[in-house]
Image: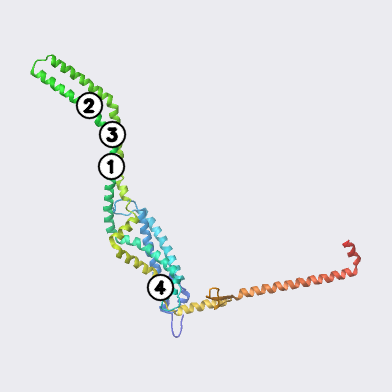
Amino acid sequence: MTRDYYESPKPGKIMQWLWKAAGSDGYILKRSTYSDQVKYACLGGIVVATGFMAALAGGYAIYTIFEPKGSALDGGAHIPTVIMSCVFGVIWGLIIFNIDRFIVAATGKGDGTEAITWQEFTNSLPRIIMGLVIAITISKPMEIRMFKSEIDAELHQEQLEKRKQYEIATKANYETRFNVIEAEIDKIEEERNKLLERLTEVESQYTEEVRIVRPGPKAAALKELMSSLGEKLKTFDKDNKAEMDRLTFEKLKLTKELDAELAKNQEVASGLDGLLERIKLAHEIAGFWITFFITLLFVVIELTPIFFKMMLIKSPYDFMRDNVKELLRAEEGIQIKYEYYKDKKGQERNLVINHQVKRKIEEKIALMAAQSELSDYVIEKWKQRKKKDIDKNVDAYISESQ
């Protein structure tokens, strides 16, 4: 718009887009001062930046939740999870962008001065709470990304300890079952060893007897005893073969079960690599104050537009916008009498008069009154006509009534 005393700068496409992000009126801003244009472009920039950070944080959080679990030090990216997290990150960023845009657009100027009064603060409290929740939600995934190297190292150590603890607990659970099988095997082997030792002893005596002297009755007796013990050993092995096979099979089966359980160590340890565990480690590694100031930074970014709007002094943009609103109301026949009456609680209330609606109602009332008057007139005329007909031929009406 060209004026003799001031020419409003022509905004670019980016600036106009930032105005839309701030929920401001581009038509009025094009005709306003450059300072107004910059102020609302900066507000829109903060909203866009918040949505962008929310997209990054949401996408990284989803990737951390759904990525294939493994050692914390394993590198590489899982492409399907990356694609899914990017899609979710864009959607989440747009959601936060829309919420922030609504919060900024719905936050008024208050009293139009730089001071933030208690009334202004309490009125903005719901928006401030929403902004705090959004800021904290964005800050946590960003924290774990900032300290990723330290978190991965600490998490890897915890995974190793978890595997060791699980291995000890698993072996302890199977130890009793192994002991029962080993005891039964040892019992059978002990009896067999006794027979074998006795047979070996007799064989030794027989060999000694034959070597020293000529074979006699003692040697024959030893040979007979040796044959008897050999038969007993064969019979013992035959009688206990099925039981030994069963016990060996049970031991092998139990060993495979133990190996399968121990093979789950990596899976169990990988369960630590989750979003909650990383947030907890981020707090432990960085400490309270670092995490607090990181969160505070995002809180400041998120709440800046709300407090900024409460601190803005009314400018030409605001007066022109109020003027446009009044013109639109006047064009539509809407009149507002400010602080016209007090309600039951003593608060000042505005009286809203919709003149077009009032005119429509008055027209409807007048039309209905005219219709009622005409109906009465028609009925009266009809009565007069009927009276004349009766006067002309009263007998006919008497016979009809009978």
Q: Three-letter amino acid code at disc 1?
A: Ala
**Mark 4 and mark 3: span between their CA atoms?**
75 Å
Which residue was labeled with disc 4?
307
The residue that label 1 is drawn on is: 172
For the residues bearing labels 2 and 1, Cβ distance under 8 angstroms: no
Mark 4 in CB contact with mark 1 (< 8 angstroms): no
The image quadrant that residue 42 belongs to is: bottom left
Which callout, 1 or 3, points at the residue further toward the start of the chain? Answer: 1
Label 2: how many residues lie within 10 Å, few (<14), some (14-19) or many (20+)? some
Q: Which image quarter: residue 185?
A: top left
Along the viewing direction, whichever of 270 and 236 lies nearer the viewer: 236
Q: Earlier in the sequence, mark 2 or mark 4?
A: 2
Q: Amino acid at mark 3?
A: Ile
Give the residue type at disc 4.
Answer: Phe
Q: Nearer the viewer, mark 4 or mark 1?
A: 1
Q: Secondary structure at mark 2?
A: helix
Give the percent coordinates (x, y) of residue 30: 45, 77
Element type where label 3 sits in the image: helix
- As measured in the structure, the alpha-carbon distance from the residue carrying label 1 to the one carrying label 3 is 15 Å
Instruction: Give the structural element (helix, strand or loop) at label 4.
Output: helix
Question: Callout 3: 10 Å neighbours few (<14), some, many (20+)?
Answer: some
Residues marked 2 and 4 touching at CB (< 8 Å)? no
Specify whether 269 is left or right of 19.
Answer: left
Q: Which residue is identified by label 3?
A: 181
